[in-house]
Image (spheres, helix red, strand yellow):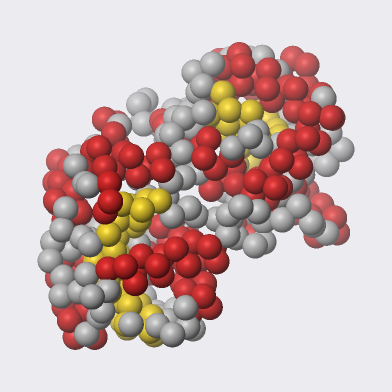
Amino acid sequence: MRIVLNGWFLIHDAHTGSGQYLRALLKQLPRVAPQHEYHLLAPVGPTETMPIFTEATLHPIKCGPSHLDKVRFEQMLFPAACRRLKADVAHVPYWGPPLSSPAPIVVTIHDVIPRLLPQYRGSRPAQLYTALVSAAAQGVSLILADSDASKNDIVRELNIPAEKVRAVYLAAEERYSAIGDWQVDEPIRKKYELEPEGGYALYFGGFDVRKNVRGLLSAWTWAAGSIGQTTPLVIGGRLPKPDGTFFEDFPALARELGVADSVKFIGPVDEADKPALYRGASVFLYPSRYEGFGLPPLEAMACGVPIVASSAASLPEVIGAAGYLIPPDDTRALGAALLTCVVEPTVADDLRARGLAQAKKFSWERTARETVAAYEAVHT
């Protein structure tokens, strides 16, 4: 069977969730099903160079990086290349399927946030794009969702029959492990001016409104007085420019709440450094209001970190009984849970053990096997 994949996120926005998903999946597909052919269509403009990629046959297609170029790639260039390559199955690994295709289409829809949350509907062109890909989803052969929660949203919001949607869980990369080398980890933590003695409460995961960083800082007010000077709250990631609605000025909010002296904004974090930062944390916090899956808590569990997270959307599926799951608006309960993880060693040890066991339930090998099963199901 010849499988042709849309590689837009291999070139553009490779470090987004969609780009990481594509790379991780492609590493495993030839391993679990070497009997099939894998072809990757990559848009390349005059300033891009082709990446080195050995897991699939790479086909460059001349295309620019603009939003209009993206639509042209999805709706015209990708289907045309599938026809030229005589694809048996076409896989679009994000919510951007073509309206028509010469081969059965499998599309991965990680979430339907623009349909669910008004703040994410964007400009008029963005709304038109959402309408386009929503209509195109009606004609695909099979949809892969990251979780049962996301599957239910897709079925409801896009009016798709439930039998056309499969939940296929994602996974943490193998480098996320509780086993580290202090000679490697300690210099990485010092790079971000983190002291290992007292540990720290850690947050990775973005700053847009659904991530609920305001709730995180509010929760911290319940714990900062007891542990803030020895165990600060560390917030990683590039702070966006505040706009008053979608992005807040979180350093200003920390000052307003009176916790600025125990909150450290460490800025952008290199992907290679994340496992060391996870391993140094006393607790990982993730109060998001909505996730299609939620990789950061899974990465943290794989690194042996106790979890305090929101009970919203897919997070209970990912975390299970391995962490505290709190309604995202209950900031006092969030604060109490994170405080417990820091000051009660037996609780923290139990959550670490539960988290490590829970993380082992997810693997990219399993994701790839279930994805190949989807390809085989639509191949006629």
Residue 79: image quadrant is bottom left
Q: Residue at x 46, y 38 (%)?
A: 314
Quadrant (top left, top right, bottom left, bottom right) of the C terminus: bottom left
Residue 78 shows up from this direction: no
Please indicate, yes or no, whether residue 33 appears anywhere in the rendered image: yes
Residue drawn at 59 percent across, 37 percent down:
320
Write the residue at 47% across / 83% down.
Answer: 34
Q: Nearer the viewer, residue 150 or 237?
A: 150
From the top left corner, tell me how far across and down residue 133 is, in percent: 19, 53
Task: List x then y, in percent, for residue 32.
Answer: 51, 75
Q: Is residue 102 left or right of residue 234?
A: left
8 over 32 or under it: above or below: above
Q: How many marks?
A: 0
Quadrant in the picture for residue 116 = top left
Is residue 347 shown above or below 322? above
Q: Is residue 294 left or right of residue 346?
A: left
Return the residue nearer the eye: 294 or 1. 1
Left or right? Give the position of 28 relative to 36.
Answer: right
Residue 185: percent from left, percent from top: 79, 55
Please name the residue shown 54% across and 16% down the image. Answer: 330
Spot occupied by residue 257 in the image (x, y as percentages of width and height):
58, 15
Front residue (pair 53, 322)? 322
Quarter holding the N terminus is bottom left
Classify residue 281 by image quadrant.
top right
